Amino acid sequence: MAHGEIIASPFMSPWWLPEQHSQTLLPGFFARRKPIATTTEKLELPDGDFVELAWTTRQQGPLIALFHGLEGGVNSGYIQGILTTVAQLGGQAVLMHFRGCGKEPNRLARWYHSGDSPDIAFLVEVITKRFPGRPLGAFGVSLGGNALLKYLGEQGDRTPLQAAMAVSIPFELGTTAKRLTYGFSRVYQWYLSRLVKKKIRQKQKTLQLDIDPALLKTAKTFYDIDNMAAQLHGFANAEAYYALASAKQFLRYIERPTWILHSKNDPFLSPEAIPKVTDLAEQVTLELADSGGHAGFIYGKNPFQPRYWIDERFRRFYRQHFG
């Protein structure tokens, strides 16, 4: 069986943003370009729920579906960067907000998780029927990238996507849950878990959730939250969720050109969980940087004029596969 390849990234962190935590945290504080205009569509799902789509206004050229990270959305800096880049290159982009991440709370008791490939599959089916013959691609970051890679592995050569790119992937969800309990990474766990717990409490006001409020109050780790939410999402427990939803096991089944950008110093994943070349299908390339943090990859000589390697790498990816 032929395998893909792992290449050393030319990305280098600048002197003013040298290590993983500054790369991970500070991008949210940089003033990006003016937000690109989008229109919102509510896409009804087969199970009675819905997701919100954000479309860029150009209605021609290749169409790129985007998938955000945990508690992200259309206003996330990395998403704005790709929306703008697609528009500059003459294409159209559509961001799928995972359930409950748009302007409205979703209807069902469940929300979203790293293995939500069925929702991606439904979106791809819808846009394929809506725009027959149009070149289709996809881009995902972190949680959204994990779900996208899972989808690609599940679909194999059946997917209508021509190519895909994913950034900063939690390849082994169980390893990520453990990594976030150590050192400074606990800050990310504290911040993100507060957002998720807030969303759960909001849902409890209108829906009957099979979650003990006392357990929710004392939950301190992602494992605690994942274990509580597992059955709502169709898993027996957190361990089953991690085993079934992690993207790493699906990489060998991907049959479309797929570019993955990841950093060795990603504070969300231990280095030993990074895939080996034997984990990769022939169509998969893993660009591995020594630095870059989690969804950071900011570079440039001038701290007042930051440059974004994610945008630059996507630009090269787009030109290679979509002209």
Image: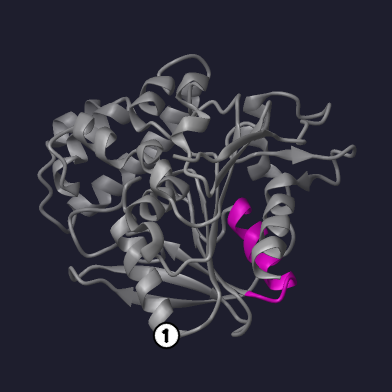
Q: How many marks?
A: 1
Which residue sits at x=63%, y=65%?
83
Which residue sits at x=10%, y=53%?
208
Which residue sits at x=13%, y=42%?
231
Q: Residue furthest right?
A: 301
User: Residue 276, image x and y in percent?
Assistant: 50, 28
State left or right for residue 285 relative to residue 299.
left
Which sits in the foreground, 89 or 72?
89
Q: Residue 109 occupies which quadrant of the picture?
A: bottom left
SS at badge 1 = helix
Q: Which quadrant is the N terminus positioned in?
A: top left
Q: Residues within 10 Å of mark 1 (few under 14, many from 20)?
A: few
Determine if the magenta segment contains residue 86.
yes
Q: Is residue 70 visible?
A: no
Which sits in the foreground, 309 or 10?
10
User: Residue 242, image x and y in percent?
Assistant: 28, 34
Q: Residue 8 occupies which quadrant of the picture?
A: top right
Which sits in the foreground, 114 or 124?
124
Q: Is residue 36 visible?
A: yes
User: Residue 153, image x and y in percent?
Assistant: 38, 50
Q: Which quadrant is the C terminus positioned in?
A: bottom right
- Disc 1 marks which amino acid? Arg
State left or right for residue 26 relative to residue 53.
right
Q: Is residue 272 above or below residue 247?
A: above
Q: Is residue 138 above or below residue 204?
A: below
Reading the image, the residue beneath label 1 is 130
User: Residue 311, image x and y in percent?
Assistant: 70, 53
Determine if the magenta segment contains residue 222.
no
Q: Tell me which segment is drawn in magenta.
A: 77-91
Q: Is residue 210 above or below residue 88?
A: above
Q: Residue furthest front?
A: 1
